[in-house]
Image (cartoon, rainbow, N blue to C red):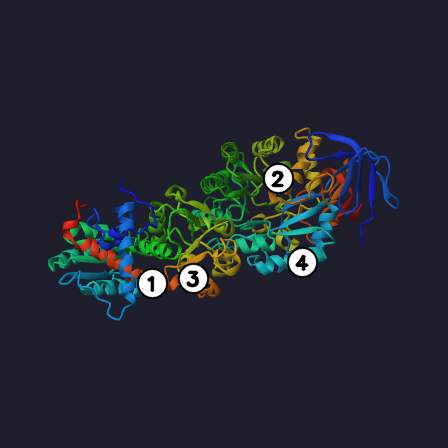
Amino acid sequence: MAQRPTGVKSNEASASPARFRSKHLLAIGDLNRFEAEQLLDRAETFEPMLEQKIKKLDTLRGRTLINLFFENSTRTQSSFELAGKRMGADVVNMSVKSSSVAKGETLIDTAATLNAMRPDLLVVRHGSSGAAELLARKVDCAVINAGDGKHEHPTQALLDAFTIRRRLGQVEGLNIAICGDVLHSRVARSNVALLNILGANVRLIGPPTLMPPGAERWGAHVHHNMRDGLKDADVVMMLRVQRERMDGGFFPSAREFFWFYGLDEDKLKHAKPGALVMHPGPMNRGVEIDSVVADDPNVSLIETQVRMGVAVRMAVLEALAEPGSNQETR
Amino acid sequence: MTTKPTLIKNAKLIDPAKNKVEDGAILFADTILDVGAISSAPDGAEIIDADGHHIAPGLIDMRVTIGEPGAEHKETFKSAGRAAAAGGVTTMVMTPNTSPVIDDQSLVDFVLRRGVDRSGGVHILPAAALTKHLDGELMTEIGLMAEAGAVLFSNGDKPILSSRVLRRALSYATAFGVLVANRPEDPFLAEGGVMHGGELAARLGLPGIPDIAESIMAERDLTLAEVTGGRLLLDMISAARTLPALKRAKEKGVKAVASVNVHHLVLNENDVDGYRSFAKLSPPLRGEDDRRALVDAVATGLIDVIVSGHNPQPAEEKRLPYEEAAFGAVGLETLLAGALTLHHKGDASLSTLIRAMTLKPAEILNLPQGRLSKGAPADVILIDVGAPFKLDSDKLKSKSNNSPFDGKLLQGVVKRTFIAGKTAFTA
């Protein structure tokens, strides 16, 4: 596998679009280190453009991107929509109310209908793990997983890595703590995978009931005491905790969760001085994160993450829109 | 104010960390200053001649039900403290099945502050509820209550029926290293039962609680402790059938411990004969084979802890037709004498028995008490191990007097109880 040291930004690489072996981006496992770095390099060239008055390229002119969202997501959907439009593609948004019965069947029917419209790129968000992969088998175009159940959310991980790299120069060798409800988090799964590919030291922090069995075999150290887990951390990634997990008995109350696993100034002091804080949003203030930390521009990268999302997704769309670029298909 | 030093000389010392009883003396103020051969006492010390009687650490009773708050007619901190000191119990772990249930950090704090205020110095440590309102469904704020001072988490007399809830609770508790207790009894198998489900129950025409009601749930609990890595207390086991699973689990390194109610070491189902509602306990007194197996398990250390299972019930709850009477017996004042029965019969050594009521619970609960070593808190009892007496339950200091030992001959009298070096009881 081709490898290149992280953080070294070759002009040649950043000048050319990223190319993937895989036809789709369904999980971080579809990427190797070279591809991931090439993609981040490419996003690097798009990022300054987003500050310009005219923010549009014509790379994807005449191409069609369909946003197929079975779950509501303002942030991810608008990020993909903007990315598509800025690359010059025609973007169609489809919000599908997920029917509770015969989901699999509906999804395949939907796939056939969409396929008949001959899109070039299909971005899908679905509440069931594996839905993106099922769809990818049924359509001819490239499929980008924008979050499937409790499985993966690869573009979130890419934008997180991109945000870290822009701020700290490189990802390799950093101590990165991912905290909260790891068990139900697709963001955590994608991040652990990508950060490992990029050479970071990953820790997972959370109560034992919200830690997946065998998480230590993912290439991460598992901590149940947040202060211990944060020791020497360069970056702290907080995950969203959903209230229904409390009623499901995974933890007893929001106040207990905040006391032991909520990121506040005191706990953050156990990380490396100047450690940075991230959150994929939307935040539960006072449950997993204290507003004092979330809103501190010196430590919080939360807004930056949103901005970086568009640049990273532009690079992803570009890489997958080129049918000739893929040497192999899944 | 500093505590006046006390020297007890000419004593037999039962140090639960050792396997023998040694002649010697003990010097203490609020902590133990010296143990062994002590030649002189500091000025102003009270000197007591033990006259060859035994010294042991104050007993730690890991299972005491007190009616306060909510059922003060059964027992209060004050009456429980009085009974405990008379029984040589210097630390009580109080069950959370009060009204309100101890399922919130403020109630844990209430028990800690109010308890010691009223108990005459006897330490009252709260066991907090494992599930909210003891409903067996949603776990409580285990972390916050552990920080507030709850020493273990239990669902009182109600077993956790849902395997998922117990699994999550055991797993969650590992983050804080706390002990989770469950009373193993399958409520479906035990439903309606009022005594051991055996031949005698059939003859008496009483619905029985089979031993498998306990062993089946205990095996489930041990499996859950194994997979979660959680610390489990099998609370008051009664059946021989439960023991092999406990032994296997311990050999595998599962973090499980077990307790037994002292009544189950001394009495059996025959004590129920004649429809004696005062011998109606939960779990029920079982067959003689079960009792013998429990005694052996205490002697070998397979069962870690002996508890009183103190459960005060007023006469109006007990003096009823057997089937309608309440479960439970008081035990604070008979824990020691009951356990010493095993010593007098030659079934278990004195140090083993004392260890199961002092050092073992102290280790399980991370308490500094329960030791006869320099620096340990001076919770110390002076006992006449051989002194015989006939229990008159009307003379018990507890507010309720429901004891199945009533009228029985027992041996072992507490002569004096010291808590943090101060006298809490003198016979």
Q: Amino acid at mark 3?
A: Ser
Which chain hosts label 4? Answer: B
Tell me the quarter of the picture where residue A143 sits. bottom left
Judging by the rendered image, the residue that carries numbered circle 2 is B305
* Quadrant assignment for the C terminus of chain A: top left
Could you tell which of marks 3 and 1 lies nearer the N-terminus? 3
A58 with respect to B175 (left or right):
left
Could you tell me if the residues under marks 3 and 1 are in contact, i.e. CB atoms within 8 Å? no
Q: Amino acid at mark 2?
A: Val
Judging by the rendered image, the residue that carries numbered circle 3 is A300
Q: Amino acid at mark 1?
A: Val
Tell me the quarter of the picture where residue A63 sits. bottom left
Q: Helix, strand, or loop for circle 4?
A: helix
How much space separates mark 3 and mark 4, taking CA atoms?
42 Å
Judging by the rendered image, the residue that carries numbered circle 1 is A306
Residue B9 in the image: state x and y as whole percent.
83, 36
Q: Amino acid at mark 4?
A: Arg
Q: Which numbered circle lies on residue B113?
A: 4
- Tell if the residue under mark 2 belongs to the same chain as the one under mark 3: no
Q: Is residue B162 visible?
A: yes
Residue B228 in the image: state x and y as whole percent.
46, 43
Residue A246 in the image: state x and y as whole percent.
43, 58
